[in-house]
Amino acid sequence: MRGPARQLKIREMLEGQGFVDLTTLCRELGSSESTVRRDLIALQAEGVLRRVHGGAMAVRAIGPRGDDFAGHARRMMAEKRRIAAATARLVEDGQTLILDAGSTVAAVARELLDRSLHVVTNSLPIAEILGEARRVDVTLTGGQLDPQFGVVLGPLCEQMLGSLAVDVAIMGIGGVTEKGLSNSNPLVVGSERRMIEVARKVVIVSDHTKFGRGALIPLAPLDVVDVVVSDTGLDPEPQEWLRAHDIDVRLA
């Protein structure tokens, strides 16, 4: 496969997934690591992607199906509002929370504006939502900024998260199957693992479309989850295997 064809294929893969790891690229393109790395360097120079550890991440919308934080926020809006309201009822005043990045978690943040809480987040949109809340103390993690989604990631973020102890981690997710949680970005997975490790309670908030399908990178087994809050469109089968792992399933 010639260079232009390889680079077009890389664009198509990023359009569909947002992140592609180097091993997958080499396999799909039938090319060596050195050849694929040269293609990634060229596409990064064009502003199409950002090279990260283990692969490449889209940094802007690519074609009509490209996406960003605002695009995610517009999807399933009614369901996200119901999920957010139900999740907020699980939170007690005085607690310390980690709020993961993502549009559903951002909807939860809007429901917490009048609460007395300490919130740690790696999401710039969530920090902005809570920035004027008089009773919410907000701590923003350090790290490398992904401007497409307004999320801070990487080793510095993971180091800070690993030093904490919090009451509840409220997290969105890329995919949920019987095998566990998964996501598409290795940097996101790294920070989310730290969030799970330091939280006494883990709450997953996600609409029904994320269940029964896995994302690229395994994150954690279902046993780490205490509560799942989803919408009434969630099929009975995933409800059954979630409850089989003693997970409290709330449908809004």
Image (tube, rainbow, N blue to C red):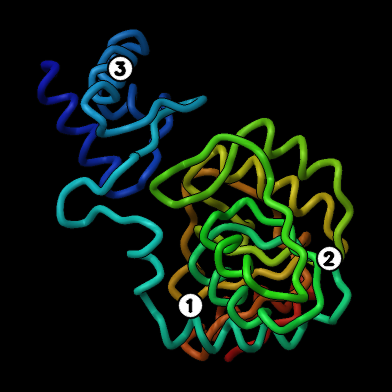
- The image position of residue 24, as x and y in percent, is 38, 30
Q: Amino acid at mark 2?
A: Thr
Q: Is residue 3 left or right of residue 210?
A: left
Is residue 176 visible in this depiction of the protein? Answer: no
CA separation in Å, label 3 and label 1:
37 Å
| Pointer 2 residue | 96
- From the viewer's side, name the closer residue of 171 and 31: 171
Residue occupying the point 71% across, 84% down: 114
Q: Amino acid at mark 1?
A: His
Q: Amino acid at mark 3?
A: Ile
- Mark 1 or mark 2, earlier in chain: 2
3 or 1: mark nearer the eye = 3
Q: Is residue 75 left or right of residue 214?
A: left
Q: Are marks 2 and 3 in contact (CB under 8 Å)?
A: no
| Residue 189 drawn above or below residue 249 | above
Q: Is residue 191 left or right of residue 20?
A: right
- The image position of residue 52, as x and y in percent, is 47, 27
Question: What kind of element bears circle 2?
Answer: strand
| Pointer 1 residue | 208
2 or 3: mark nearer the eye = 2
Question: What kind of element bears circle 1?
Answer: helix
| Pointer 3 residue | 41
Picture quarter with the N terminus: top left
Residue occupying the point 77% across, 45% down: 161
CA separation in Å, label 1 and label 2:
27 Å
The quadrant where residue 97 appears: bottom right
